[in-house]
Image (spheres, rainbow, N blue to C red):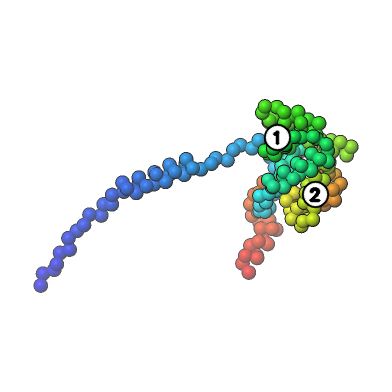
């Protein structure tokens, strides 16, 4: 009995439609993706092997290598309350329009006596050109007042959560006296716990911590 011959079919697949879809998706992601803007205050943080992620609503104190200090308030709702508190307690006499403009600033880096005049300018000064919050010594440390307004606004809440939100982001070349004066501002407000922002890196192979992690993984 003769064998039935199965007709051969072409194995060629037309990829035209697939390529069109791929390029359409690529074009969509290129146009829709927001590029991360460059940091206004770029600091080279020290390295560490910590993998903890900073909270979204963190309160960050940035130290530049030239000794300036800046404050960032991540929680937009609390930020307005903190600015209202500092305006009241320090007698800045800022109008509603000035407060609204102040609330839009990402970095706070001016002495109290320069804030009102800076807000009257057509365009806000670049943070890189600001002198920073005065933290030269215990007698002239305006960060004490800023942190006092922070604690006033967060009073009555979970203080452990507040302490977890407090971060210090310092340049690797920052001098210790600046860090010491920032710690003084924390201490004056009875804040004894904060975290330091570092540049994460892998655990060195063969180190004690690496061997411990491998041992726990193999259990």
Q: Earlier in the sequence, mark 2 or mark 1?
A: 1
Question: Which quarter of the figure is the C terminus placed in?
Answer: bottom right
Residue nearest the viewer, comparing 42 with 115:
115
**At 67% across and 27% down in the image, what residue appears?**
122
Residue situated furthest right in the rendering? 139
Residue 177, quarter of the rendered image = top right
Q: Rounded to the nearest whole Å, what is the CA distance between mark 2 and mark 1?
A: 25 Å
Are circles 2 and 1 on residues that touch, CB within 8 Å? Answer: no
Question: Would you place residue 205 above or below residue 112 in this image?
Answer: below
Residue 147: image x %, image y %?
80, 45
Horizontal arrangement in the rendering, residue 84 relative to residue 17 (left or right) = right
Q: Which residue lies furthest to the top in this view?
A: 122
Tell me residue 54's x, y (percent): 67, 50
Residue 125 in the image, given as x and y percentages of width and height:
69, 29
Asked if 112 appears above or below 74 in the picture, the reply is: above
Q: Residue furthest left?
A: 1
What residue did someone put label 2 on? Answer: 151
Residue projecting furthest to the front: 96
- Residue 19's disc number: none
- Left or right, 183 with respect to 8, comes to right
Q: Can residue 177 be seen in this view?
A: no
Circle 2 crowding by C-alpha within 10 Å: few under 14, some 14–19, many from 20? some
**Picture residue at 77% right of the left edge, 51% below the top:** 154
Q: Position of residue 43 (x, y in %)?
A: 69, 38
Look at 80% across and 49% down and name the residue there. 151
User: Considering depth in this image, is 192 or 178 the residue closer to the camera?
Assistant: 192
The quadrant holding residue 10 is bottom left
Tell me the SS state at disc 2: helix
Label 1 sits on residue: 97
Q: Can residue 52 be seen in this view?
A: yes
């Amino acid at each position: 009995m003769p064998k039935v011959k199965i007709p051969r079919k072409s194995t060629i697949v037309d990829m035209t439609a697939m390529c069109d879809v791929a390029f359409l998706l690529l074009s969509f992601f290129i146009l829709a993706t927001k590029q991360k803007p460059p940091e206004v205050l770029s600091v080279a943080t020290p390295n560490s092997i910590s993998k903890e992620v900073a909270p979204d609503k963190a309160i960050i104190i940035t130290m530049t290598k030239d000794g300036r200090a800046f404050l960032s308030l991540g929680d937009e709702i609390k930020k307005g309350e903190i600015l209202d508190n500092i305006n009241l307690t320090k007698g800045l006499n800022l109008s509603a329009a000035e407060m609204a403009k102040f609330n839009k600033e990402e970095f706070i880096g001016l002495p109290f006596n320069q804030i009102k005049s800076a807000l009257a300018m057509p365009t806000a000064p670049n943070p890189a050109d600001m002198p920073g919050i005065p933290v030269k010594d215990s007698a002239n440390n305006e960060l004490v007042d800023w942190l006092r307004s922070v604690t006033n606004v967060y009073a009555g809440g979970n203080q452990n959560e507040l302490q977890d939100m407090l971060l210090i982001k310092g340049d690797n070349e920052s001098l210790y006296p600046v860090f010491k004066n920032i710690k003084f501002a924390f201490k004056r407000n009875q804040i004894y716990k904060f975290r330091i922002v570092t540049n994460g890196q892998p655990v060195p192979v063969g180190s004690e911590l690496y061997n411990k992690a491998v041992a726990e993984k193999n259990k």
